[in-house]
Image (cartoon, helix red, strand yellow):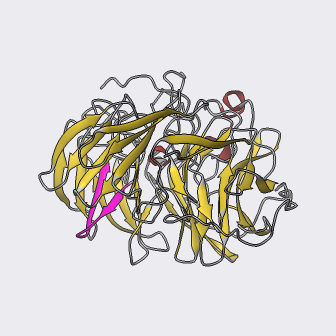
Amino acid sequence: MHRATRGSTIRTRARLGAVALGGLLLLAGCTASAPPSPTTSRASSTPSPSRPTPTGPSTPVAVPVPGVTAWSSYHAGPERTGAVAAGAPLASLVRAWSADLGGAVFGQPVVADGRVIAATETNRVVALDPAGAVVWSASLGAPLTDVGSVAGCGDIDPLGITSTPAVDPATGTVYVVGEVSTGGGAVQHRLEGFSVATGQVVLSEAVDPPLPAGEDPVHLLQRASLVVANGRVYVSFGGNYGDCGAYHGWVVGVNETGAPALVSFEAAADGQGGAIWQGGGAPAVDAAGNIYVSTGNSNPDPAAGGPDPVQYAESVVKLSPDLKPLAAFKDHGAGGDDDLGTGNPVLLPGGLLFVAGKTDVGFVLRQSDLSEVASIGGLCGSDPDGGAAYFVATNRLFVPCSGGGIQTVDLASARRGQRLSGANGAPVVIGGTLWAVEYPDGTVSQFDATTGALLQRQAVGDSVPHFVSPSTGLGLLLVGTDSGVAAFRGGG
């Protein structure tokens, strides 16, 4: 099925010998040989991250605003509903400040302890105070540049930190993963943990998966957002736009204390592909600590019409805390480039789960065994990309459509509803209103989450990356841009 060309971070499959269309993270393959056991060894060429020198107070900032004071990971919480209570009023939106950080911010800015923390494609991590001033800044090392020539494909350049960071509120640590150039075209994916308050580095670990012989980390893209759960940081991988090289989807888990070895899950171990990228969304986590991911198609593309023959491709997979598969659901109608993995699973009340992919079908599954409860066809009219938001008051989902619009889904009737125009990025629900961004030009819109009425629309003031999703905290609405972060406050 034809898919519209998409821009710099959209996942649309090109054949191995040709780079066409526009997109973000894709699938590729692995060799058929079994991967080696995880190891604690670290590459000797690992660069040491620069240690930041704080330029502001080393204690949390007192923030005299009501409501939301923390946004710790993608779409706010482990269920990935993207919904939070109302905070400071955001009516009559005005720009509060913008921060030029010297690189694109693809992930959501996160908020903790009076700080706004953002990470850029130049591998810079910055903590800002509520007024937008830099408190501390750190570098993971040089990002990969000239990506297309070095990796053979890819459309993010420079390529550094692409995913949304995650905060452990219990320890006051923010985690990021960057693609770090180690010289000669080699890269390493590096996890860094920073004290939110001071910028001190508290964890530094290589997190490349235990790749089979002949595979190279340069063919992996760490696009899906990070997860903190079970005393671990979970890191997911797919591939660069263009499907160059042999690779497949991975999740690895790293103890927050560092040692011992990684735990890992490999998708498509019997073939290639199965990328875990989720339009930038994060895996979901249930109350027992189980992890839910969605995957893309095998590489090269399987026959149109499905099912994809490779294990765990085009699937939702439920993983134990140590990343052992517990259950799986395969979209049997997904063939060709029909990624189920274009958006992350969203955990719903009553033990249910929602996911939608490029067959334009939304699936409601049971969390317990991933059996199908309902399917809703005809979503979006273009690829649903990025995480859906869920509004419990109306039992309604909001699915981002890459070609334009936010598709509403009524769960009670398992039917699609209206499509809200003027935005295509992954939405969030703040109180009773829905917020979403139109990429790449950069406008932010507020809708009534019950009626769908447009309440306001403002220019971000800068171009924004694909799949951009806003976050909120400290009385601000926050949007990552192609140069840093834009912050808005209510003007009424």
Q: Quadrant of residue 174?
A: bottom right
Q: Quadrant of the N terminus?
A: top left
Q: Nearer the viewer, residue 376 or 253?
A: 376
Answer left or right for 459 relative to 12: right
Name the spot of residue 322 as percent of width and height, x first: 50, 74
Name the spot of residue 403 as percent of width and height, x first: 37, 28
- The magenta-colored residue range is 345-355
Above or below for 445 versus 476: above
> Can you see residue 381?
yes
- Residue lying farthest left? 413
Q: Nearer the viewer, residue 410 or 232?
A: 410
Q: Quadrant of residue 412?
A: bottom left
Identify the residue at image location x=59%, y=73%. 169
Above or below for 168 versus 414: below
Above or below for 340 versus 23: below
Name the spot of residue 423 as percent of width and height, x first: 40, 34
Name the spot of residue 390 as percent of width and height, x first: 32, 55
Q: Nearer the viewer, residue 80 or 300?
A: 80
> Can you see residue 225?
no
